[in-house]
């Protein structure tokens, strides 16, 4: 059906009362709301058929087979690519007291921007709850909602490299740059394989291979080497976006500077559906590598000593563009070191760590290296090369073993395996300012880390704070809408815990509310020790607490007021709603009823 006739038909159905503009509020007064299946305003068969024709049959009625007990299916849920290929699937299964993964009523398995525009227009005209899903990794559950229409972008996987990209309308105003355009359904591993393995360049994305490109970039985005290259959002040059009015826009610093800025960290599914992103690429360094080991202290005093030494070592030797990723501090007085580096060879990496290790391994220190100490190095171009990874880093990667999966296409890091299907009991984060590394404050930091790690495992993600990054990476991040706290944070501290997957209806996969509550209390207590050091809440929207009370301030700080204005301009009716997204305070928690404008 031609687009114009379709829109006329929709308008006609409104005139005959098939569209329902207002929904009674609990108080009885008419308040604008969305419709659910069974409500009088829910679109009829004819309307769905018309949408299906417009998207050439790519409209799916969604049911989750997980709703019946199905042990075979549950086994396959341990493969993130399998989950990503299911219209009803999400990578986390839920979060206690917050959300449980639920299929939409219908989905458009979009192939291009026209499909997305058709879905957006349909949802707006019929007052449907609209959801967007790419890689399905949202911790907050923002890519699933019952009774919704889903725009599912997974099929929109493309990667085109440019040697001299100029955003539309910026001709003569900016220098051409090396860039890559990635379709909305592209996963980061496939983006890296295209840009690095085949293209010999670097693009800033995420650490986890199966996260979706726009989902990460729209929230800010940090990867293992962000201390060198900065936030992923800061490298955005242009976004093709379908806005709430159904228009397909090429958004960049010249065409729509406000919207462009809001897309750089303002959160997914808030200002529109991104159908393609163009990101700056960089020259590759010579190497990427890792230092991996577990240090064990035999007493609380020895663990404190280890923390003291490590904090000083980090401040003097690691807080620079070469070093990212994390250490994890366990209540059992163990420190797991999983640091990644770029641009150094094995000798340089080993040389750097030698004095620290010599000091802590002195006889009588009470600290030992448990198990192996590994320094692994790869030519940067091979770091995401599937053949190379399987040949040389076999224990660190997993492969999609479905017969339908092409060989050497779908890999993921083994370290992300424990999160598959996770049902979160708690997840909290805070940015830690670099001022805590000043010699006079290091002892306070050590004490807080020690106190925190008594309650739960604490992860320090050094690549997710920009202190120590090159000035150009910091400057580019300053021009995003993420809270300025990220600029001088040396790390993002994450404290999180989950239980086994919860699949309603599947025997043996019920939630355990008592354990969940218990874990959440410990996680909260651990984070409270760190937040004593950082009285202003500041955390990373994509990896934060679902129950964060001061979320506007925590995620966007002083940028929030401007984001609200941009939201009102481009989405005045709040078509795009996500939990704790910009403008979500105007809606009921399920996004179905507008509370105020
Ligand atoms: C195992 C794991 C590892 C992670 N590692 C990292 C990491 O290393 N660095 C980091 O920064 N983050 C990391 N994250 C967080 C991750 O970046 C976010 O959860 C991200 O939003 C996921 O994007 P997605 O497309 O995979 O997920 P989805 O759940 O599909 O999408 C996330 C949000 O973005 C919206 N969205 C998706 N596609 C579009 C689009 N095309 N247009 C508009 N909105 C869209 C969705 O509606 C949803 O609100 C990790 C998460 C997990 C589960």
Image: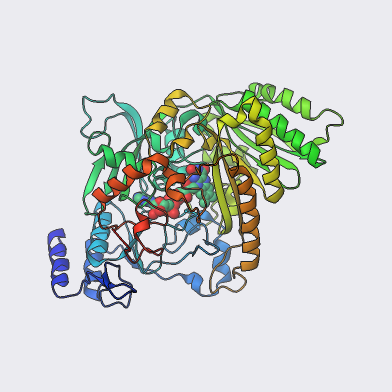
Q: Is residue 338 left or right of residue 357?
A: left
- Residue 49 location, quadrant: bottom left
Q: Position of residue 291 (x, y in %)?
A: 65, 33
Judging depth in this view, the residue of 283 and 39 nearest the camera is: 39
Q: Position of residue 323 (x, y in %)?
A: 58, 29
Give the vertical position of 59 relative to 414 (above or below).
below
Q: Position of residue 518 (x, y in %)?
A: 65, 61
Judging depth in this view, the residue of 366 and 414 nearest the camera is: 366
Q: Could one spot residue 408 in this view of the protein?
A: no
Q: Is residue 15 left or right of residue 359?
A: left
Q: Residue at x 25, y 74 (%)?
A: 41
Q: Position of residue 230 (x, y in %)?
A: 46, 32
Judging depth in this view, the residue of 511 and 109 nearest the camera is: 511
Q: Quick one: quadrant of the N terminus?
A: bottom left
Q: Residue at x 54, y 42 (%)?
A: 535
- Residue 170 location, quadrant: top left
Q: Residue at x 22, y 37 (%)?
A: 255
Q: Could one spot residue 177 in this view of the protein?
A: yes
């Amino acid at each position: 059906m031609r687009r114009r006739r379709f829109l006329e038909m929709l308008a006609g159905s409104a005139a005959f009362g098939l569209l329902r503009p207002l929904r009674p509020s609990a108080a009885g007064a008419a308040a604008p709301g969305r419709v659910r299946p069974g409500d009088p305003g829910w679109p009829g068969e004819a309307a769905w058929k018309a949408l299906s024709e417009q998207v050439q049959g790519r409209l799916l009625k969604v049911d989750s087979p997980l709703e019946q007990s199905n042990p075979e299916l549950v086994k396959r849920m341990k493969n993130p690519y399998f989950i990503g290929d299911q219209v009803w699937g999400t990578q986390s299964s839920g979060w206690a007291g917050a959300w449980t993964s639920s299929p939409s009523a219908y989905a458009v398995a979009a192939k291009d921007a026209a499909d997305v525009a058709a879905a957006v227009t349909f949802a707006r005209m019929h007052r449907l709850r609209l959801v967007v899903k790419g890689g399905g990794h949202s911790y907050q559950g923002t890519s699933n909602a019952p009774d919704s229409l889903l725009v599912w972008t997974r099929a929109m996987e493309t990667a085109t490299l440019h040697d001299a990209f100029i955003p539309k309308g910026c001709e003569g105003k900016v220098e051409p740059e090396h860039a890559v355009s990635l379709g909305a359904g592209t996963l980061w591993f496939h983006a890296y394989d295209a840009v690095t393995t085949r293209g010999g360049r670097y693009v800033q994305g995420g650490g986890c291979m199966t996260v979706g490109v726009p989902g990460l970039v729209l929230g800010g985005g940090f990867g293992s080497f962000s201390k060198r290259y900065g936030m992923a959002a800061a490298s955005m040059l242009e976004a093709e976006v379908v806005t709430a009015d159904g228009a397909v826009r090429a958004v960049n610093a010249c065409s729509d500077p406000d919207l462009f800025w809001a897309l750089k960290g303002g959160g997914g599914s808030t200002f529109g559906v991104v159908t393609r992103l163009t990101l700056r690429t960089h020259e590759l360094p010579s190497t990427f590598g890792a230092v991996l080991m577990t240090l064990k202290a035999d007493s609380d005093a020895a663990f404190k000593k280890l923390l003291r030494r490590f904090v000083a070592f980090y401040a003097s030797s690691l807080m620079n563009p070469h070093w990212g990723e994390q250490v994890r501090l366990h209540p059992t007085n163990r420190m797991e070191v999983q640091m990644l580096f770029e641009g150094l060879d094995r000798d340089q990496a080993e040389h750097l760590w030698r004095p620290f290790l010599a000091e802590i391994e002195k006889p009588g220190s009470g600290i030992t290296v448990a198990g192996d100490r590994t320094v692994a190095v790869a030519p940067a171009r091979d770091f995401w090369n599937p053949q190379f990874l399987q040949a040389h880093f076999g224990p660190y990667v997993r492969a999609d073993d479905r017969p339908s999966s092409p060989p050497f296409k779908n890999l993921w890091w083994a370290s992300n395996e424990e999160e598959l299907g996770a049902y979160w009991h708690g997840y909290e984060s805070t940015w830690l300012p670099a001022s805590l590394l000043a010699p006079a404050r290091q002892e306070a930091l050590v004490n807080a880390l020690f106190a925190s790690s008594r309650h739960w495992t604490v992860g320090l993600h050094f690549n997710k704070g920009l202190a120590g990054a090159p000035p150009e990476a910091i400057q580019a991040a300053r021009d995003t809408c993420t809270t300025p706290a990220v600029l001088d944070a040396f790390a993002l501290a994450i404290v999180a815990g989950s239980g086994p997957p919860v699949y309603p209806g599947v025997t043996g996969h019920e939630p355990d509310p008592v354990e969940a509550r218990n874990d959440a209390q410990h996680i909260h207590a651990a984070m409270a020790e760190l937040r004593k050091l950082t009285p202003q809440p500041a955390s990373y929207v994509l990896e934060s607490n679902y129950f964060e009370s001061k979320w506007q301030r925590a995620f966007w700080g002083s940028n929030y007021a401007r984001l609200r204005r941009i939201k009102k301009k481009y989405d005045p009716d709040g078509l795009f709603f996500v939990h704790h997204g910009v403008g979500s305070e105007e809606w009921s928690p399920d996004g179905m009823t507008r509370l105020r404008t």
